[in-house]
Amino acid sequence: MRLVLAEDHALLRAGLIQLLEAHGFTILHAVDNAADLAEALLDPEAEAAVVDVRLPPTQTDEGLTAAITVRTARPGFPVMVLSQYVEQLYARELLASGEGAIGYLLKDRVSDVAEFVDGVRRVAAGGTVLDPEVVATVMARSPEQPVDRLSPRERDVLALMAEGRSNAGIAASLVISEKAVAKHINSIFAKLDLPIGEDDHRRVRAVLAWLHL
Amino acid sequence: MTAYAAAQLALAVPALVLFILNAVAGVFAVIVVGIPVLLLTIPATRWIADQHRSMAGRVLGTPIPRQYRPPRSGGALARLAGWASDPMTWRDQAWILAATTLGFALALTSVLLLVLVVTGALWWFGIEPIMRARCAMDRWFLSYGHAEVLEQRVQVLTETRAETLDHAAAELRRVERDLHDGAQARLVALSMTLGMADSMLESDPEKARRLVSEARATTTAAIGDLRSVVRGIHPPVLADRGLGGAIEALALDMSIPVEVTNRVGGRPPDPIESAVYFAVAECLANVVRHSGAGHAWITLTHAEGVLSAIVGDDGRGGADPQAGTGMLGVMRRLAAFDGTMRVSSPAGGPTVVTLEVPCALSSPKTMPSSEPA
């Protein structure tokens, strides 16, 4: 898997390169500013990108803009966006930039290497990966909604589904069997009146739509 | 113009009555009886003075500002003390004396000139100078002169500067405390955990591994603490997207639907953006905490050199801006920029908070269009 990496802090960039290469990714271009990122994303060899939201020159949301732009030019191009802080507003904009193949994570999630690498792989495979903090804000702001009808465990499962986890991922995270996860999911979909989708991607979309994200 | 003169004549009698009531009640306020009377007569006096201000303003061609000090918070006594310390209250009193004597004579002349048919021609030519004289007199009493305006401006600036410094110092203390109790404490724990792991690396690798993973969790928590401190100082989304975008982001995180309409074309100066952002955040927090509203709206506009943010909700109303420390902090912060906050919150709602700050906008930047949250 050939990646474009954009991160302006030299230390973090070196760390990310090391980490991703150790897990079988090839870093095609590693850039530290918005102009170089735009150019690197034109490379037809690139298969996915990992970008920081804040980049020179203005240190605001260049990375986000670049992610949305490349996905307009190359629909479905997988981009994992990293940031020191997460905003629901930005999550919405990223989700609106095309079907799947999008990730939005806090930068410090990188410290859980296995989880982070798995996230990049899922995004590259067309999946959606959302930071638990975004999902938590969205879940918290719907107090009177039918979320109340879910059991605490079902709410955990719903949150993990919204983060884009697979059944296996949810089972590992909650230390329960995949069978138990499937049972919870059936119950959630029945309670929330959602159509049960066959594949994970469509399931994330359905859950996020239900949560109004 | 003669109609104004007639109105001035008609209002002279109640004005005189109010003057006497004010004077007598003012004396009797010492033994409490006068207080309830003053609570009625002072606002009535101000109303009459306001009528004359607007009449004189129209006759003279330049509006006469209403320059009363903002009412003091607290009970009836605090309000009375506020009125007593406002020089304009005393000017009103002096004005009544002038308006019921010399002013009355001028206004009477205007009316009589019209009524007496013989002097119709005199009325035609004389009304203008007479009424201008009368209104100039009203203006002299009912508004401050140039030097007084400057004097008061200095006083306001001195007060707001002191408040701003206090506020800044308090903010710094809060940041210091947050860092000290949060990230700093966690980093100390982190270094301890890593030290222990280091010393156990050979003797007990399993235990060392557990300590390292504990250290990682502590790091995550420390980063989380830093993130929340940063948000409290200057929300990153404000730097990224400016006031409109930051408020949209804020609205999205609320537990009730908040509709944001942004009609501000450019960017206000950074400190003002920040003050208005935190003011709106405080208003929204109050909406969610106290109003029981099912829906709220925010409108941002900039017109005639004034940036306004209006935060409304369909809740139960009855909000008292003096009740919490939060809103007082907002007012102080806005006051540093000559900004104001007005709250309209009748029982039963709706509550509408209007924040206004005079400021210029920098180069109009294209903003993402507003959309309901």
Image (cartoon, coloured by chain):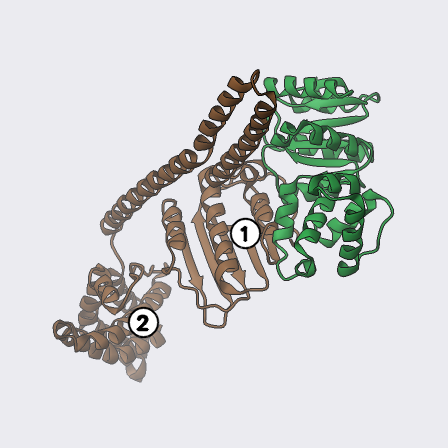
Report the residue that reaches farthest toward the right: A198
Q: Which amino acid, by three-letter code, is at mark 1? A: Leu
What color was chain A assigned in the picture?
green
The structure residue drawn at horizontal position 26% and vertical position 65%, both measured from the top left corner, is B79
**Residue at disc 1, secondary structure:** strand
Q: Can I make out residue B304 in this image? A: no
Name the residue rendered at 79%, 44% in the picture.
A178
Separation of disc 1 and disc 2 at Cα?
32 Å
Q: Does A128 sit above or below residue B252?
A: above
Residue identified by numbered label 1:
B300
Tell which of B352 and A102 is nearer to you: A102
Q: Is residue A18 above or below residue A118?
A: above
* 1 vs 2, front mark: 1
Tell me if residue A20 comes above or below residue B309 in the rendering.
Answer: above
The residue indicated by pointer 2 is: B47
Q: In the image, which disc is placed on residue A38?
A: none
Label 1 or label 2, whichever comes before in sequence order: 2
Q: Could you tell whether B194 is left or right of A62 in the image? A: left
Mark 2 nearby-residue class (10 Å; few <14, some 14–19, many ≥20): few
Residue name at image x 63 percent, y 47 percent = A136
Read off the chain for label 2.
Answer: B
- Coordinates of residue A151 in the picture (x, y in percent): 68, 57
Q: Name the spot of residue B95 as percent of width and height, x first.
A: 21, 67
Residue under mark 1: which chain is it in? Answer: B
Compared across the picture, whether B85 is left or right of B129 comes to left
Q: Residues within 10 Å of mark 1 (few under 14, many from 20)?
A: many
- Who is closer to the viewer here, B362 or B236? B236
Query: Tell me, what hue is chain B?
Result: brown
Residue kind at label 2, given as amino acid type: Trp
Q: Residue at x 60, y 17 (%)?
A: A10
Say what secondary structure mark 2 lies in.
helix
